[in-house]
Image: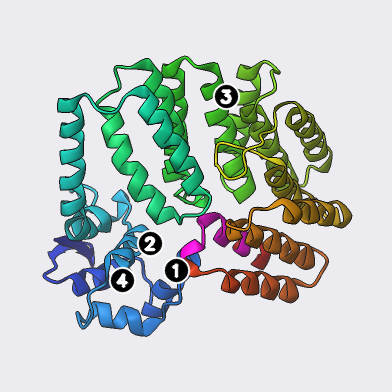
Amino acid sequence: MDTQNGGKLRRVDTLGRLISELREAHQWSQSRLAAEIDRRFGTNLDRIHISRWENDRVRPGAFSLRRLSAVLDMPRETLEGDTKRHTFLTDVAGSAIAPLAASELLEAGFSARISEGPTAEEWEERLSLYGSQYMSLGAHDIRRRVSRELVLLQQQSDQRRLWSVAARLMTLYAKTFPGSDGEKAVRWYRLAAEAADHSEDLETRVWVRGRAAIALGYEGAALKVADSFGQQATEISDGRPSLGLLNALMGRAHAAAIRGNVKAAHHLSDQGRRVFDAAGSHEQASDYAVPHWRMNVFLSLLLARLGDERGAVEAQDAASAELPAELPRFATHLELHRGLMLARSGDKAGGAAYAQAAMDALPPERHSLTLRMLREEIRA
């Protein structure tokens, strides 16, 4: 493995040395590297962890390798000549993690091709299952399960109806990446939109774009992209009420609120409420549904961002009254919204402490990327 050092590429013989070389290429101390990983992933690393890795006393596990790969990824311009872009993920983490996963995915893909794979009806059942699992499982579990299904679907892409299934699964997969990462989440949302267009199914085309808009708008990430998806969904729907249009309007409302455009945020929110009255879902626990409690979760954060304390509290109380007990993660969402209200009222330390206490009360395996991003918004 070659890395840059003093303008030249040199051979690195151990994983620890590679971590050290890449860290130094960023001109970071060990403490700074630990802080960067903590900031992005909400971990509790310190300099001692980095030191042990770099001295090959402890080998980082799979999760740590993935986090290091995201933080230490080296841009092309830091490497000389025509050398291909060296990333920690492909050159090290990939070799440590990928072989077994790649083997399983290849086997699944060829098996699906040979056996012709599940029927369209079976795929719809799986899609429904993943929509329910998303509400309670962590991002890593969902990503691992859905990635295998996407490999299977690739082998059946000659069926137009399955492009609709693939588009909705891609959207779910995109949500396992933080929108603040920019490229990964957005790239998958765009692929999902293209797959939806291949399906020629209007409802899917609107839903995929609307779901991307609310995901990015709620997270406060990639706001231009959130607006773009939201506007596309609105135009394609031609005003016909649907859950996709509802998501699109609420996503655009959140983007407007974050930018400080209060008038536009309220206007879009009012439109969203009217669409909800016509197209709201009675399902309680699926990412493909927006029941009354979930609509109030959307409103709770939106009104907290707008400084409407009374409206936010009403939405929080309404959501809490109907929130299914098996979905504690969404109860934590509401607590973070209250923390945001505290911070916006001037008690920044109190808001940050309230948000952290809410996160601490939820088991770590239930934490989501969105919750961590909300916590960072409160801290900021």
Q: Is mark 4 on a helix, strand or loop?
A: helix
Q: How far, Cα to Cα, is label 2 from label 1?
A: 7 Å
Q: How is the image coloured?
A: rainbow
Q: How far, Cα to Cα, is label 2 from label 4?
A: 13 Å
* In this rendering, the label closer to the viewer, 2 or 3: 3
Q: Is the magenta stretch mostly helix, strand or loop?
A: helix
Q: Which residue is under mark 1?
A: 36
Q: What element carries label 1?
A: helix
Q: Which amino acid does label 1 sit on?
A: Glu
Q: For this rendering, which residue is in front, 43 or 227? A: 43
Of mark 3 and mark 4, the one earlier in the sequence is: 4
| Residue 141 in picture, x, y percent from top left | 38, 54
Q: Which residue is under mark 3?
A: 206
Q: Which residue is under mark 4?
A: 24
Of mark 2 and mark 4, the one earlier in the sequence is: 4
Q: Which residue is under mark 2?
A: 71
Question: Residue at 58% across / 57% down in the picture?
Answer: 326
